[in-house]
Image (cartoon, rainbow, N blue to C red):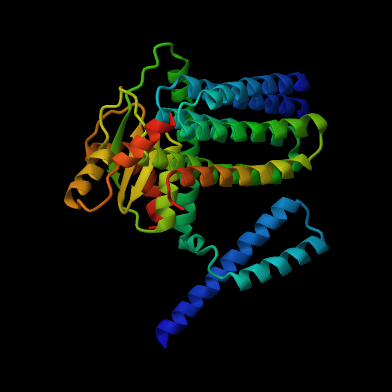
Amino acid sequence: MVDLLIILAAILAGGAFLFALWRFLLGPTRLDRVVAFDVLTIVSITFIVFAALIEKRGIYLDVALVYALLSFLGVIAIARYLGDRF
Amino acid sequence: MSAFIDFLGGLSLLAGSAFLLFGGLGLVRMPDIFNRIQAGTKTTTLGTLLTLLGAAMLHPEWSLKLLLIGVFLIFTNPLSSQVTACTAHYRGIKKSSLTKVDRLADDESESMEKSVSKNPDSEHKDKEEAEL
Amino acid sequence: MLTNNKSNVFVKRRVLVMFATLLLFWLMLQGSLGFDVIFIGILVAGLIAYLYPSGLSFFTEFRATPEAFKAGFRYYAYFFKELVKSNIRLASVVLSPSLPINPGIVKVRTKLKSKMGRLMLANSITLTPGTLTVELKDEWIYVHWVLMESDDIEAATREIVSGFESYLEVMYG
């Protein structure tokens, strides 16, 4: 029962990933892509949590934590670079 | 009892993913970048928090680490969207025609008139058009 | 002499707050309370707090009074309520076929003085119904509002800021 719910939730998150990917490919400006990339990374964090749930391995959560930190820094760096503020 | 909590956790996971899906849909449907940021940042924050809550219900022994991820997300998610919005406004990316008021642009053009020596904003706008 | 003494106390408090924060994060990350975990945590957190005493200076702006803690709890309750409300409203906008939006960038004023208080306010505004902080300039905050109700400064301030400000004022000033 719970496994079925996890798989359903993963499918919905996959839909969110595809929508964000569409916006990422469509653009039209580079900042739109940055926004889409931000959403893509956050959806990826939930994917990592789903992977940890399905495999029942808590060590994956450390990956999610580090990924959250680094992706945040990446988005900030690109946005500030595009704003000529380095 | 434990089966009931597991079921609640599964529902929480499902609700979080549904919010993520709405966020993705908003990202595609909204007409300009500011509205897209709004759709992207709010729904993903609540969606991810609900997912983490569901995972904590299914595996209580992970809850401390999940809480840490949640705290980081609450602090960092709005920050990155604010920086992106600020940059978008600075570069003069076109707003949707539905936008009626822009106090920030009004104030900036006012201070521009006062100090003529500042380099004009139009340079960035030209660059942005060329990049399209 | 007196001022020197006072600033010394301030620096000590800062180092202590930094040490406690680092140790707490380490223990949460490890998820166990073994002797070796606590020993390594105290050693490394102490070393970092000693080497970088000003690293987390903005955390110490929190007023450690009972009222502040009470306001903090109420703030988080209000925050999560608003977050859920904003998501439901945004989802209904996105799902309706006509996309009923009325965006605009308005200007609001804040009474908060401290850096951390303003940062928390800007973050809260971003996560509440239909509003997104675009720019922070001194006491003025420029906010993008999806479902704009009024572009008047006073009315917008009342609508967007005042709910959070009353709690944050007690917490940070």
Q: In this view, does B7 lie above or below C81?
A: above
Nearer to me, A34 or C101? A34
Q: In this view, does C10 lie above or below C105?
A: below
Nearer to me, B127 or A64? B127
Residue drawn where x is 34% and y is 54% of the image: C112
Residue drawn where x is 71% and y is 66% of the image: C44
Residue sitting farthest toward the top: C97
Residue sitting farthest toward the left: B114
Residue C50, given in percent of the width and then of the height, sits at: 62, 73
**Quadrant containing the N terminus of chain C in the rendered view:** bottom left
Residue drawn where x is 78% and y is 40% of the image: A58
Q: Is residue B77 above or below residue A19?
A: below
Q: Is residue B20 above or below residue A63?
A: above
Does residue A51 appear left or right of residue B11 in this picture?
right
Nearer to me, A69 or C124? A69
Residue A3, given in percent of the width and then of the height, sits at: 77, 22
